């Protein structure tokens, strides 16, 4: 154990150092900048043996990271918000080429209007790209997930890139104790990089040529099969990490007090901590609730969602972003899974905390108790979703 | 034990560093902590906020602190331009950087420490600014009552090595000893 007081961003930088990443290419953007700033400092003072590539845009940042990775280097990048949107095309490219890459995304709202605070629109916008996508609840998990990401992406059964998400400011710029482990222990746990294929000048190889419809579709099918396999690998890596370092998080979904609960709340990211506080307090007041904390939005834990939520009276989904004209993306995902069940629970989506609106445990207590009271009274919902604006405390 | 603290300072005074070091000191006491700035656009000299939570148990919440148990004021002139008492719990503590006792209305415990003088005496000055974050940190530990000066010194020396660490540690010690409650 080696505990330091670190921001979420510094925790990610430490994990990148511990993973012995060889190439980092990035372009600065608030609130990500301090990740790469710290890495750059570590490289400069000789703590880290990596090549830092300065680029002129996020599109090039991921392109350079991809290039390094396809050449066999363990590579990392980080971005947020508009930077991630600008990268979007290369995200498809990286996943389609089946190249393991790890990227931190400090989730931040998208403009206009300009807003630097947390919001999950940027990360949710990447759900279709073929990347594994995760969200941390606290700084320690941001560190642990980043380290785990290298094992997951480089697994023979996966070969897909992965995003480690952490909320802007409430994690990225908040100091908290983080166990950064010892280098020699991490070295024993994390083997050197493996990948499906490497392009080098000795072994010439071509990637990205035209694929006719049938081949293209088969390659898409392969990505989906890899995503299915990734579910098992994510669970396995988290379990083994726990056995080795004493911390694991429940794999794809963390189930907090949900086995005996009548009602569940599903959400992802840092506010899950506030929700846990709310659930503990509500249980004292007779509300029988639990939390499904979605750690991975891709691959979606279909089986676990069915397992945890089946037989519950109600499932409330809290989203920190919206798909305009429909609903919160997490609500769309979870309700689509639960509708497979013959008798789905009562479901409602709540949109809150958008653009960094502060949501405390008292707010979440209000949201949950209202939901439970409504189901108890009425049994179902007239409206599919509602907005929670309150900022009273 | 669960304490929420709000620090009022001016950009460049090191309020965020003080909050951060308080968390590190709490860590050395076997406690848990969380420190964060107000997440906006900060400029040198402008009023800024930093926050800290200290607890016996791991801290899960990430929301803003709106009803602090303690308010720390790095610059007494902020009383005139910011509502530094906003949300402070009844009976809450106020710690002010001031050469003399100050008057605060309401049922609060008020403390003062001459952090500026301590910083000037030790030549903790950069670009004409007295660096008061370490003396304020020492005074905060004393007023909180559950963080030892040894842990504060250790936190300071973790952050700054060599002579700078030594001088800042002395500044914290002096403030720890000289902070006074206004009765």
Image (cartoon, rainbow, N blue to C red):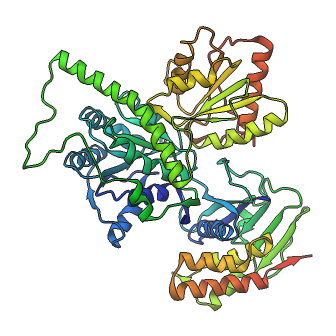
Percent x, y of residue B165: 56, 83
Percent across and percent down for residue B106 are: 90, 61
Residue at the location (53% across, 58% down)? A7
Instruction: Tell me if residue A206 comes above or below residue A58 in the rendering.
Output: above
Q: Quadrant of residue A205?
A: top left
Q: Nearer the viewer, residue A356 or A4?
A: A4
Q: Residue at x 75, y 34 (%)?
A: A365
Residue A222 picture location, percent across and down? 28, 25
Vertical side of A165 occupied by B163: above or below:
below
Towards the viewer: A362 or A272: A272
Q: Residue at x 12, y 48 (%)?
A: A200
Residue extending farthest to the top is: A342
- The image quarter containing residue A52 is bottom left
Q: Quadrant of residue A183?
A: bottom left
Instruction: State the image coordinates of residue A380 (x, y, percent, origin top left).
Output: 70, 12
Q: Residue at x 71, y 18 (%)?
A: A313
Q: A36 or B30: nearer the eye?
A: B30
Question: In terms of depth relative to the viewer, which is nearer, A85 or B47?
Answer: A85
Q: Please indicate whether residue B160 sits to the left or right of residue B60 in the image.
A: left
Q: Do we see residue A349 in this rendering?
A: no
Figure check: B18 above or below B85: below
Res. A72 in view: yes
């Amino acid at each position: 154990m080696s505990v330091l007081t670190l921001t979420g961003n510094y925790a990610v930088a430490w994990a990148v150092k511990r993973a012995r990443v060889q190439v980092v290419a990035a372009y600065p953007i608030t609130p990500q900048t301090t990740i790469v700033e710290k890495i750059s400092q570590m490289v400069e003072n000789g703590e880290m043996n990596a090549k830092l590539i300065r680029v002129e845009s996020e599109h090039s940042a991921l392109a350079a990271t991809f290039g390094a990775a396809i050449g066999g280097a363990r590579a990392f990048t980080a971005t947020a918000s508009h930077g991630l949107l600008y990268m979007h095309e290369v995200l498809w490219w990286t996943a389609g080429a089946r190249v393991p890459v790890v990227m931190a995304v400090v989730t931040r709202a998208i403009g206009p209007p300009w807003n630097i605070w947390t919001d999950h629109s940027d990360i949710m916008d990447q759900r279709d790209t073929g990347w594994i996508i995760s969200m941390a609840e606290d700084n320690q998990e941001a560190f642990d997930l980043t380290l785990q990401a290298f094992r997951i992406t480089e697994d023979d059964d996966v070969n897909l890139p992965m995003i480690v998400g952490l909320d802007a400011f409430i994690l990225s710029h908040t100091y908290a104790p983080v166990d950064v482990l010892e280098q020699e222990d991490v070295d024993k746990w994390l083997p050197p990089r493996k990948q499906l294929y490497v392009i080098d000048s000795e072994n010439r190889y071509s990637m990205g040529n035209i694929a006719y419809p049938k081949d293209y579709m088969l390659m898409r099918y392969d990505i989906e099969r890899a995503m299915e396999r990734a579910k098992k690998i994510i669970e396995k890596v988290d379990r083994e990490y726990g056995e080795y370092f004493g911390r694991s998080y429940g794999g794809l979904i963390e189930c907090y007090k949900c086995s005996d609960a009548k009602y569940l709340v599903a959400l992802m990211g840092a506010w899950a901590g506030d929700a846990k506080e709310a659930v503990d307090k509500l249980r004292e007041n007779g509300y029988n609730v639990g939390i499904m904390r979605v750690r991975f939005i891709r691959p979606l834990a279909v089986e676990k969602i069915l397992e945890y939520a089946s037989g519950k009276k109600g499932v409330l989904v809290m989203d920190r972003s919206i798909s305009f004209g429909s609903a919160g993306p997490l609500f769309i995902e979870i309700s689509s899974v639960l509708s497979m069940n013959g008798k789905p629970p009562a479901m409602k989506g709540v949109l809150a905390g958008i653009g960094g609106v502060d949501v405390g445990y008292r707010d979440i207590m209000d949201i949950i108790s209202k939901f439970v009271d409504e189901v108890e009274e009425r049994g179902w919902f007239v409206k599919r979703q509602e907005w929670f604006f309150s900022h009273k405390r | 034990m669960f304490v929420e603290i709000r620090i009022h300072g001016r950009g460049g005074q090191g309020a965020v560093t003080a909050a951060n070091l308080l968390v590190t000191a709490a860590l050395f006491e076997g406690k848990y902590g969380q420190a964060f700035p107000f997440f906006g656009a900060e400029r040198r000299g402008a009023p800024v906020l930093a926050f800290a939570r200290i607890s016996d148990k791991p801290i899960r919440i990430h929301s803003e602190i709106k009803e602090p148990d303690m308010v720390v004021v790095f610059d007494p002139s902020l009383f005139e331009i910011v509502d530094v008492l906003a949300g402070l719990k009844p009976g809450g503590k106020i710690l002010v950087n001031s050469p003399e006792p100050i008057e605060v209305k309401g049922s609060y415990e008020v403390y003062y420490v001459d952090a500026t003088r301590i910083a000037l005496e030790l030549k903790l000055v950069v670009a004409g600014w007295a660096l008061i974050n370490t003396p304020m940190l020492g005074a905060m530990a004393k007023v909180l009552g559950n963080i030892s000066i040894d842990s504060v010194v250790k936190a300071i020396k973790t952050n700054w090595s060599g002579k700078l660490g030594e001088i800042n540690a002395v500044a914290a010690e002096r403030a720890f000893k000289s902070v006074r409650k206004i009765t």
